[in-house]
Structures are given as C-alpha cells and as structure tokens.
Amino acid sequence: MSIGPALVSILRQGSYLIASIHTALDDSQMIRFQEDLIEQIGQHRSRGVIIDVAALDVLDSFGSRTLRNIAEMARLRGALTVIVGIQPEVAFAMVELGMGTGSVFTALDLEEGLAYLSSRVSSSSALST
Amino acid sequence: MDENSTVDVDASYVEAGGTPQAPEGFPDALAGDRQDVDQLLPQLVAHLGEHRTKLRQEWASRIQDARLLQAMTPQEMAAETTSVYDNYVEVLETGSVEALQHYARDLSERIIPRGVETHEVVGIVLLLRDVLARSLFEKYQQDFALLNRVLDAYEPAANRIANTVAVSFVDERERVIRQQQDAIRELSTPVLPVRERLLILPIIGVLDSERARQLTEQLLAAIRIHRAKVVVIDITGAPDVDEAVANHLVRTVDASRLMGASAIITGLSPEIARTLVTIGVDLSKMNTIGDLQGGLEEAERLLGYTVTRQNDSAE
C-alpha cells in the first residue's frame, strides 16, 4: 500500500474491506486511494466495501465523484460498497451543490454499514433494528 | 451672517463670557463679534442648565398635550423626562452622542415591551427640541444676528440627537424582533423521536427559506444523535409550499439519505400536490404517503416493527 497510514487505512474484516479516510485528500491522493482499494478487493476476494468518511468535514465534487467511481468499480469486481459517516454539514453541502453519491448506499456509521452489508451480501433479509 | 466681516475680537472677553458659569456675561455688547460654535454651545448649555426645571416642565406638559407616552405613569414620565433632558444637554455640552446612545438603548429596552411606538419616541425628542429652541428665541430675541448664530450651533447638534435617539430605538426594536423570530423558529421545528431510530418532523406554519434551512440542520443533527433510520416529515400543518421550499424538501430528503436515513413525506394536501405537479418539482425520489398515520405504519414496516393489539378478540 503506497499511501501512508496517516491519510487512509484499509482494513480487512472477514469478507469485507473497511477503508477509513482520516483527513482531507487532494486529487492525486484520492486517485491513489481508489487504485489501492480496487486492487485489494481482488487480493482479498472481498464481497463488501465500507468507506468511512466520518473524519471529513468537507467533501468536494472530485471526492464525491471518485467515491461513486470506486463503488461502481467495486461492483464490477464483485463487491458492494457502502459509504458511512457523512457528517450533517457535509451532507447538506453536498446536496446544496448538487453532488450526491448516486446509487451508492449510505449509512450513518460503521455499525450500520456492516449491518447493511451483512443483510445484502449474505442475502439474508433480516433487518437489524 | 456677518460674523466674518468684523475681525475685531475681544478674545479674553469672549472666553470669559463663553464659560458655563457666566451665561449672563453674554449681553448685546458682543453682538456682531465672531463667535464660533465652540463658544456658543457652552452658553447654550449654561442657559439650558439654568432653566432646567421650567423647561423640563414645559416639555412634559407638551408631551401630555400631544397625548404621547400614555403607557407611562406620571412619576415615570417625570423621571424619564429629567434623564432625557439631562442627556440632551450633556450631548450639547460634550458633542459626544455615545452616552445618549447608551441611554436611549436602555430606555428603549424598558419601554418597548410596554407598547411604546416609534412615533412617540421621535415625537417627544422633537418636542424637546422645539421647547428648547423656543426658549432660545426668547432669550436672544433682541439680537437677530446672534440668534441666528446660536441656532446654527444648536440645530445640527439637536438634529443629531433626534437622529441618535430614533436610530437607537429602532435598532433596539429590531433586536427584540429578531430575538423573537429566533425563539419562534426554535419552537416551531421540533424533531421528535417516536420509536428507537424513528423520528417525526412535523412542519407547522409557513416555511420560508431561512426556516427551511434551519429545519434541515436540526433534522440532520437529530438523525445523528438518535441514529435514526427513518424520518417522517409531516407537512399537514404547512399551508403552502412554493417551488423553493419544495426543492429544499427534496434536498433535505437527499441529505438524510446521505446520513443513512430514509425519509417519508406525509400530509400533502390536495392543493400542495397540485402545486407541486404544476410547477414540476421532481418528487420521483421522494417517498410520500397520504397521512401521518400511514407514514408511521410504513416507517414501522421499514424498521421491522409489527404492532399488534394485545387483546385479539377486541378486533
């Protein structure tokens, strides 16, 4: 992994990958993050990816587009992506500026994201409450 | 104006006559001599200080004749008119309106809750201005040129005072109004948790863009605090929805989804439904249900709750 642990961490948890973004990334760092993540999906034969953006207080249009791209690429490589931890201000700014996450599922936090993945990936219909 | 034509000035005499302690040292002998505002104002102040009681009483009686400030008792009137008078004279003396500004704001704070109107406050200040001007007319009536110069000194200061008081009053009133608006807004947008992970946001009253923004902020914060998965936004109490507000609702729903909560909109009246379709707001992504009851049932279904009555035979 070419990105230092200070910026991003990608952890394996069973058949899922949990990627946490710790600080605002510039465009090239974002691209590297994308490459690393897509690479590791194949390495670990992951079925689900959780991208945690809770530490970000700003998400620009490039960032949100890259997240959408990652989700699409991950889907092509057989993994379902959830974005978790979008802060209220970030969520509002994103819709104000017309940038959504497209069809990518979003959840409140890591726990919710894991619950969603386990309900979808193992195709069990149990809904955790 | 002929004060610049005669250059012959008995400077020492002017100085002595100009001090507040010796207002009587300003007889006709000095008429025509050059006197600037700095020298005339102290004389004015001395004059106004000397006749303070009489002028204040005259002013108070004119206020009564004009039927202003009837919300105040005579005692209060006496106290307030005295302070206003003293402040007024002080401004003439020092030329600084800061103290007056402070006093006017303080006074406004006390009298606004009692329903005193702007026209009354401006009215009493203008009355005082007139009373004092009359007294100056009386004092200097023998010498028209001197009277002119006295008024030249008096009028700008008096106008500034009237201005200051009016502005302070209006400022204070606006501050009160803003405060009340904030309070109403806070009260009018409650976000209520009804079940674990289920919030209700009843919208009551007119939605303007400022309130809509605040509502969104509160909702998003509440989603985070309560870890909500479903939010029911009930707009039964909103009389009207225009395009801007409808678009804002759409954005609120989008933002909630980004936070992992799905939103259900309930209580769209026939008029609102017609308006939204007519103005062409894209509501295809919105989950709408007729009434709040239906919305709650749908939310419970989404969360996996089933509500059953305990006594089945009662059904």
Image: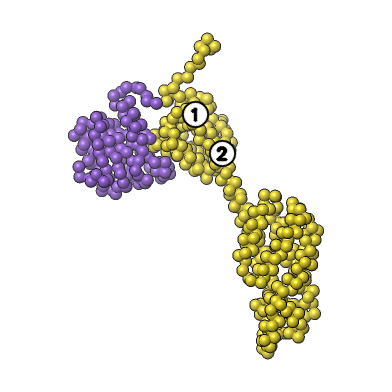
Q: Mark 1 falls within which chain?
A: B
Q: Nearer the viewer, residue B310 or B304?
A: B310
Q: Nearer the viewer, residue B60 or B308?
A: B60
Name the mark on residue B126: none
Rendered view: B14 above or below B190: below
Q: Is residue A86 left or right of residue B116?
A: left
Name the colour assigned to chain A in the rendering.
purple
Q: Is residue B170 left or right of residue B242?
A: right
Circle 2 is placed at which residue position?
Answer: B188
Outermost residue, left side = A43
Q: Nearer the viewer, residue A25 or B70?
A: B70
Shown in yellow, the chain is B
Tell me where residue B60 appears, x and y as whole percent: 77, 61
Rendered view: B287 above or below B37: above
Rendered view: B178 above or below A41: below
Picture residue at 53% right of the left edge, 38% below the top: B189
- The answer to whether residue B197 is visible is yes
Q: Nearer the viewer, residue A26 or B194?
A: B194
Residue A41: name its quadrant. Answer: top left
Picture residue at 44% right of the left edge, 34% below the top: B226
Rendered view: B31 above or below A81: below
Question: At label 2, which amino acid type do we have?
Answer: Ser
Q: Nearer the viewer, mark 1 or mark 2?
A: 1
Upstream in sequence: badge 1 or badge 2: 2
Q: Is residue A32 left or right of residue B65?
A: left
- The answer to whether residue A74 is visible is no
Outermost residue, bottom side = B8
Regarding mark 2 in the picture, which secondary structure is present there? helix
Circle 1 is placed at which residue position?
Answer: B194
Q: CA distance from mark 1 to mark 2?
A: 18 Å
Regarding mark 1 in the picture, which secondary structure is present there? strand
Question: At label 1, which amino acid type do we have?
Answer: Val
